[in-house]
């Protein structure tokens, strides 16, 4: 079964170009400059081999995006003017042949030659301090919200939180994402089924959580809220959340901050019209070609947070409840027979100990 990608680079082409145009009282048209070609670059360089890659796509005049595999992509380092070639892997993906070690203070920039006349370059980005994750925790929480009919809805769930190590610099900027893994033992499984080795993994594709040393008002962060998960069948046995913390540059922080601000517009007539969010990439000498995206340089830290059903006091529908309820009305979900029928089914992830 196809596993959901554990880390999806937060910068999305949609987020960059149109970024979920708010549902406004009046519709606003984004003034996206038309040119013969526009590019989207999703580039990340962390101190982890899984996250050293570039995804390049081209936007045609009809607005359709397609992977671009014919570019020359290199990382340039200010360390002895070193260049590191990234190899094409298909579907617009480029990555280095060997791991690129990062050290605090090193500077890198990305250079992409799409043809003889078009060169996409990034600003120079400096590798920030590494910030450790020193603890994770969870707590039961009741989330309240008012629906469209004016009715207050309460949802019981779990808040997941983390603590960081000490900041070495006041210019510390952090971005968080996560993925979860849980067990589905498929109550109606065939005894011959190898279902106990199946785990359901889901990511945080549309998730954006950033903070900074300034916002924390201190030398470290305590009980930073990652997310709230409502109680559902995922908690039937055990759920583990892997929290990823990336120390990022000031440029990246401001980029994500702009995305977050646009995403949170209320959609009133007093809101400014949505704008194109530009990152740290541009085409040398050609103002009529647009590049959307970000070259992100950072340092990664991870921590798992585990919760067992026996620790949860509130009631919720487990896999067993759902499957037996389906049996009573002769409408049984396929995941009751095999966990591999559920989206995200995967072998045991490394953090699920």
Image: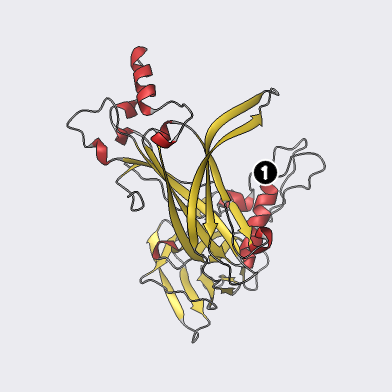
Total numbered circles: 1
Residue, disc 1: 21
Rendering colour mode: secondary structure
Left or right of 97: which side holds 114?
right
Left or right of 285: which side holds 324?
left
Q: Nearer the viewer, residue 103 or 8?
A: 103
Residue 103 in percent (x, y) is at 48, 76
Please rate how many residues cluster around mark 1, counting C-alpha atoms within 10 Å: few if below 14, some from 14 to 19, many from 20.
many
Q: Is residue 109 visible?
A: yes
Secondary structure, mark 1, is: loop
Please say if 154 is above or below 4: above
Left or right of 149: which side holds 302?
left
Q: Residue at x 65, y 31 (%)?
A: 145
Residue 294 in percent (x, y) is at 58, 62
Residue 149 in percent (x, y) is at 69, 22
Furthest residue in direction bottom, as rendered: 80
Please say if 319 is above or below 165: above
Q: Is residue 34 visible?
A: no
């Amino acid at each position: 079964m196809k596993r959901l990608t554990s880390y999806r680079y937060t910068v999305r082409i949609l987020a960059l170009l149109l970024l979920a145009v708010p549902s406004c009282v009046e519709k606003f048209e984004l003034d996206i400059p038309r040119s013969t070609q526009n590019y989207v670059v999703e580039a990340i360089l962390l101190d982890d081999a899984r996250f050293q890659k570039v995804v390049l796509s081209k936007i045609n005049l009809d607005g359709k995006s397609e992977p671009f595999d014919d570019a020359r992509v290199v990382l340039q380092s200010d360390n002895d003017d070193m260049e590191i070639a990234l190899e094409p892997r298909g579907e617009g993906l480029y990555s280095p042949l060997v791991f690129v070690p990062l050290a605090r203070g090193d500077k890198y920039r990305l250079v992409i030659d799409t043809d003889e006349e078009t060169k996409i370059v990034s600003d120079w980005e400096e590798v920030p301090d590494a910030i450790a994750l020193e603890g994770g925790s969870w707590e039961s929480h009741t989330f309240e919200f008012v629906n469209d009919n004016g009715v207050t809805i309460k949802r019981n769930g779990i808040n997941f939180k983390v603590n960081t190590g000490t900041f070495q610099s006041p210019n510390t900027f952090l971005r968080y994402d996560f993925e979860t893994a849980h067990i589905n033992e498929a109550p109606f499984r065939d005894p011959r089924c190898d279902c106990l080795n199946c785990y359901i993994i889901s990511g945080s594709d549309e998730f954006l959580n950033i903070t900074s040393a300034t916002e924390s008002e201190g030398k470290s962060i305590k009980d930073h809220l990652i997310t709230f998960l409502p109680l559902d069948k995922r908690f039937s046995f055990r759920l583990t959340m892997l929290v990823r913390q990336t120390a990022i540059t000031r440029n990246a922080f401001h980029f994500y901050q702009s995305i977050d601000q646009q995403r949170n517009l209320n959609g009133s007539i007093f809101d400014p019209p949505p704008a194109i969010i530009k990152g740290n990439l541009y085409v040398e000498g050609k103002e009529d070609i647009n590049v959307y995206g970000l070259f992100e340089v950072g340092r990664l830290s991870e921590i798992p947070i585990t919760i067992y059903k026996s620790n949860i006091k509130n009631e919720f529908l487990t896999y067993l409840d759902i499957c037996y309820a389906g049996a009573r009305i002769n409408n049984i979900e396929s995941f009751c027979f095999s966990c591999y029928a559920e989206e995200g089914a995967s072998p045991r992830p490394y953090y699920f100990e």
